């Protein structure tokens, strides 16, 4: 199915994907790895990480950045998908590092994960300002999961951030964004109170950096979500059940 999307005053055609029918062997093996933490695998059914990464085209041997990747749910899966010939950077900003010392401080969860055999193979953790993000070698892809809205209320210079990601990617590289949907017309008004953002805002800002929106998916769509409440409401029972948009941008060849 095709969607007509208006961006920067020009009409473009964007492919809509509702689902990935099957995971390839490498992706399935990564998702089903027996040594993944149980606290993370229990969330897979709703988060559908294999389908998300397959939609974004993540494959073995790639170099990928997990931007603001938190305690590492996606970083860990990416590490397994890209394998020994690939590399994953979990890039955390200073604001998050300072606010959550139990996760990002000395002896915290992220430091402990870095000592696991899996992460020692091909994962590095870096801290810095999002506008100053860079990679030691050109990246094949960068993803940002459930955090673009936070960059707004945290005061991130998003034009610089998106331009930095653009510069870090190879020509043809992918920039994937997954976030909680707000009501149409809400713009950025609920980024802190509801932790939601309007999809059109994200598209406009990222395309302004030179990217092209090439596909989006309804994989994590939840039409029953009224999109007018804080995503942490009833968190234990409603976790991972919000309406979420998944966007695939590409740096032109």
Image (cartoon, rainbow, N blue to C red):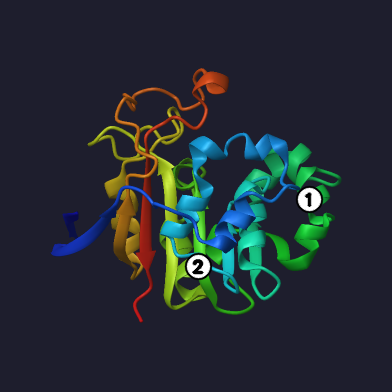
Q: State the quadrant of the N terminus.
A: bottom left
Residue 221, percent from left and from top:
34, 38
Q: Give the residue at mark 2.
A: 141
At 49% from the left and 20% from the top, the residue drawn is 233
Residue 112 percent across, percent down from the top left: 83, 48
Q: Which residue is mark 1?
A: 113
Task: Locate the C terminus and report the quarter of the image it occupies.
Answer: bottom left
Cα separation between marks 1 and 2: 22 Å
Q: How many marks?
A: 2
Q: Residue at x 67, y 68 (%)?
A: 83
Reply above or below: 195 against 165. Answer: above
Disc 1 element:
helix
Residue 163 spot, x, y in % from top left: 43, 68
Observer able to see residue 8? no
187 or 36: which is nearer to us?
A: 36
- Asked if the residue under mark 2 is in contact with the one under mark 1, i.e. CB atoms within 8 Å, the reply is no
Mark 1 Cα shell of 10 Å, populated few (<14), some (14-19), many (≥20): some
Front residue of 117/110: it is: 117
Q: Quadrant of residue 129?
A: bottom right
Q: Is residue 107 visible?
A: yes
Q: Examine the image and state in which quarter residue 159 appears.
A: bottom left
């Amino acid at each position: 199915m095709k969607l007509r999307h208006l961006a920067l005053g020009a009409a473009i055609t964007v492919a809509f994907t509702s689902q990935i029918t099957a995971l390839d062997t490498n992706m399935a093996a990564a998702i089903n790895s027996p040594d993944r933490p149980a606290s993370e695998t229990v969330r897979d059914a709703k988060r559908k990480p294999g389908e998300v990464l397959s939609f974004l085209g993540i494959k073995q041997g790639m170099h990928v950045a997990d931007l603001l990747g938190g305690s590492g749910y996606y970083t860990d899966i990416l590490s397994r998908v890209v394998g020994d010939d690939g590399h994953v950077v979990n890039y955390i900003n200073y604001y998050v590092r300072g606010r959550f010392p139990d996760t990002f401080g000395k002896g915290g969860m992220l430091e402990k994960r870095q000592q696991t055999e899996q992460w020692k193979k091909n994962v590095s953790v870096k801290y810095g300002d999002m506008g100053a993000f860079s990679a030691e070698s050109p990246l094949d892809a960068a993803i940002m999961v459930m955090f673009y809205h936070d960059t707004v209320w945290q005061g991130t210079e998003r034009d610089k951030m998106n331009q930095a990601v653009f510069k870090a990617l190879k020509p043809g590289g992918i920039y994937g964004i997954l976030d909680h949907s707000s009501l149409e017309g809400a713009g950025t008004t609920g980024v802190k109170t509801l932790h939601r953002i309007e999809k059109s805002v994200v598209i406009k800002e990222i395309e302004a950096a030179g990217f092209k929106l090439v596909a989006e998916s309804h994989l994590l769509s939840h039409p029953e979500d009224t999109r007018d409440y804080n995503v942490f409401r009833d968190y234990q029972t409603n976790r991972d059940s919000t309406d979420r948009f998944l966007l695939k941008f590409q740096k032109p060849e």
